[in-house]
Image (spheres, grey):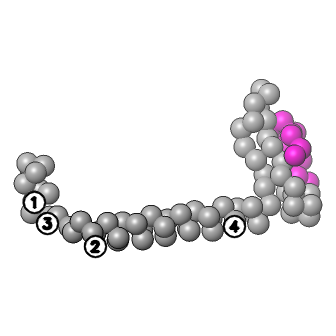
């Protein structure tokens, strides 16, 4: 992975973007010697979004299973319990 400081990114953003799209390699952006951001191929972002969607679906399925097992609580009871 390539590391580029933020000052260089400002100067070379177009080149960095083109190189990342072409080579599919990530570029880590640093500031004062610390990693602060990254330029990544769009395929990486799409993969992350797909993973997040699958995790969300797993959580939704678990919540539905919990409702089937344990039932639900009425809105009236929730308001009463919260003193509303």
Camera-nearest label, 4 or 1? 1
- The region drawn magenta spans 1-16
Q: Residue at x 79, y 35 (%)?
A: 30
Q: Earlier in the sequence, mark 3 or mark 2?
A: 2
Q: Which residue is mark 1?
A: 77
Q: Which residue is mark 2?
A: 68
Considering depth in this image, is 8 or 4 the residue closer to the camera?
4
Residue 81 shows in this picture: yes
Q: Earlier in the sequence, mark 4 or mark 2?
A: 4
Q: State the separation of the CA atoms marked 3 and 1.
A: 5 Å
Q: Find out whether the residues at labels 3 and 2 contact each other: C-beta distance under 8 Å.
A: no
Q: Earlier in the sequence, mark 4 or mark 1?
A: 4
Q: Name the element at disc 1.
A: helix
Disc assigned to residue 74: 3
Q: Find out whether the residues at labels 3 and 1 contact each other: C-beta distance under 8 Å.
A: yes
Q: Which residue is mark 4?
A: 46
x%, y% of residue 4? 86, 39
Q: Earlier in the sequence, mark 4 or mark 3?
A: 4
Q: Residues within 10 Å of mark 4 (few under 14, many from 20)?
A: few
Q: Name the element at disc 3.
A: loop
Q: Is residue 49 left or right of residue 75?
A: right
Q: Name the element at disc 2.
A: helix
Q: Residues within 10 Å of mark 2 (few under 14, many from 20)?
A: few
Camera-nearest label, 2 or 1? 2
Q: Find out whether the residues at labels 4 and 1 contact each other: C-beta distance under 8 Å.
A: no
Q: Residue at x 20, y 67 (%)?
A: 72
Q: Name the element at disc 4.
A: helix
């Amino acid at each position: 992975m390539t590391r580029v400081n933020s000052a260089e990114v400002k100067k070379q953003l177009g080149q960095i973007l083109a190189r990342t799209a072409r080579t599919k390699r990530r570029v880590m952006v640093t500031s004062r010697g610390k990693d602060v951001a990254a330029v990544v191929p769009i395929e990486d972002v799409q993969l992350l979004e797909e993973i997040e969607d699958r995790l969300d679906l797993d959580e939704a399925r678990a919540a539905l299973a919990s409702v089937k097992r344990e039932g639900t609580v009425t809105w009236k009871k929730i308001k009463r319990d919260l003193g509303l």
